[in-house]
């Protein structure tokens, strides 16, 4: 073996230099490229640009959506109050013991659009002109229906001569004042403690008979004055229940 055979192969220095330059160019391009990347150890610059148009549009869209939700919820609430259900508070003791002052009840306004008025229903109706006073809505119980003759004997209620059983009336509260009903809703001539209810009218009375302004004072009410049927007591919370 000759000395020439034992020497290591020669390295092309120009190739090494070219490779080093290529690496430098690569790093330079990484440090100043359009993608915003930076070399290790460099600190990225803090952006001072204003929010992009996309962010502004997104915030405006969210605001519009929330306003639409609020307006929609208000519209639904108003529709429910106008056509379906409405809450009323009890302003007087005329329905005691069934309802006390400041109780709250929920009224179904569709009850008599879809069904008939029944004896014993608790109804909210517009204040009759004959009643006067500051209260706009009355709440009483249906006692006599159209075509029936209601009369009173010693505090008891009679319908077409038959004594009416009224478990909702406190026995001590059946004391009855003597009346002579003279109203459009009565077909008969004015007579002591008697009224034959006209078609489309209803005779209403409070459960607290000695302390109630009702049809004994202003006569039967017309059906078109009925707001709806009170079906649920919602306040106080401890007394929630159906009526």
Image: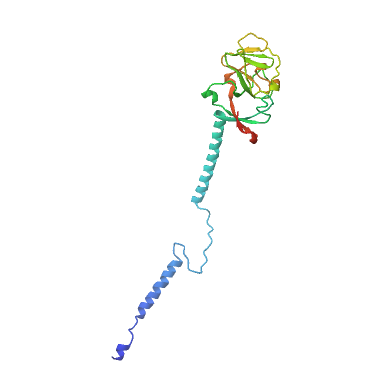
Q: How many callouts does the rendering have?
A: 0
At x 44%, y 67%, the residue is 30
Query: In the rendering, at what x and y percent does residue 218 appear?
Result: 66, 17
Q: Quick check: 6 left or right of 143?
A: left
Q: Is residue 142 above or below residue 77?
A: above
Q: Is residue 76 visible?
A: yes
At x 64%, y 33%, the residue is 239
The residue closer to the viewer here, 62 or 20, is: 62
The residue closer to the viewer here, 82 or 91, is: 91
Colour mode of the rendering: rainbow
Q: Is residue 19 above or below residue 110?
A: below
Assign the C terminus to one quadrant of the image: top right
Query: In the rendering, at what x and y percent does residue 49 appear?
Result: 52, 56
The residue closer to the viewer here, 236 or 200, is: 236
Query: In the rendering, at what x and y percent does residue 13 appear?
Result: 36, 80
The residue closer to the viewer here, 217 or 53, is: 217
Q: Residue furthest top?
A: 189
Query: In the rendering, at what x and y percent does residue 123 appear?
Result: 60, 24
Q: Is residue 211 visible?
A: no
At x 41%, y 70%, the residue is 25
Residue 144 picture quarter: top right
Assign the N terminus to one quadrant of the image: bottom left
Q: Residue furthest bottom?
A: 2
């Amino acid at each position: 073996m000759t000395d020439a055979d034992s020497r290591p192969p020669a390295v092309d220095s120009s190739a090494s230099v070219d490779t080093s330059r290529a690496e430098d160019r690569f790093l330079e391009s990484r440090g100043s490229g359009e993608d915003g990347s930076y070399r290790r150890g460099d600190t990225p610059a803090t952006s001072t640009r204003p929010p992009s148009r996309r962010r502004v549009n997104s915030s405006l869209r969210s605001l519009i959506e929330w306003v639409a939700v609020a307006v929609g919820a208000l519209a639904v609430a108003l529709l429910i109050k106008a056509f379906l259900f409405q809450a009323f508070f009890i302003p007087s003791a005329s329905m005691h013991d069934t309802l006390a002052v400041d109780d709250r009840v929920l009224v179904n306004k569709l009850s008599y659009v879809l069904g008939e008025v029944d004896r014993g229903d608790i109804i909210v109706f517009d204040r009759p002109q004959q009643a006067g006073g500051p209260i706009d809505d009355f709440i009483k119980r249906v006692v006599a229906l159209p075509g029936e003759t209601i009369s009173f004997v010693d505090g008891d209620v009679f319908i077409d001569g038959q004594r009416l059983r009224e478990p909702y009336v406190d026995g001590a509260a059946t004391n009855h004042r003597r009346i002579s009903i003279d109203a459009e809703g009565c077909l008969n001539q004015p007579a002591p403690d008697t009224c034959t209810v006209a078609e489309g009218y209803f005779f209403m009375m409070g459960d607290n008979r000695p302390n109630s302004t009702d049809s004994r004072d202003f006569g039967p009410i017309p059906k078109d004055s009925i707001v709806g049927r009170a079906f649920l007591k919602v306040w106080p919370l401890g007394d929630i229940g159906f009526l």
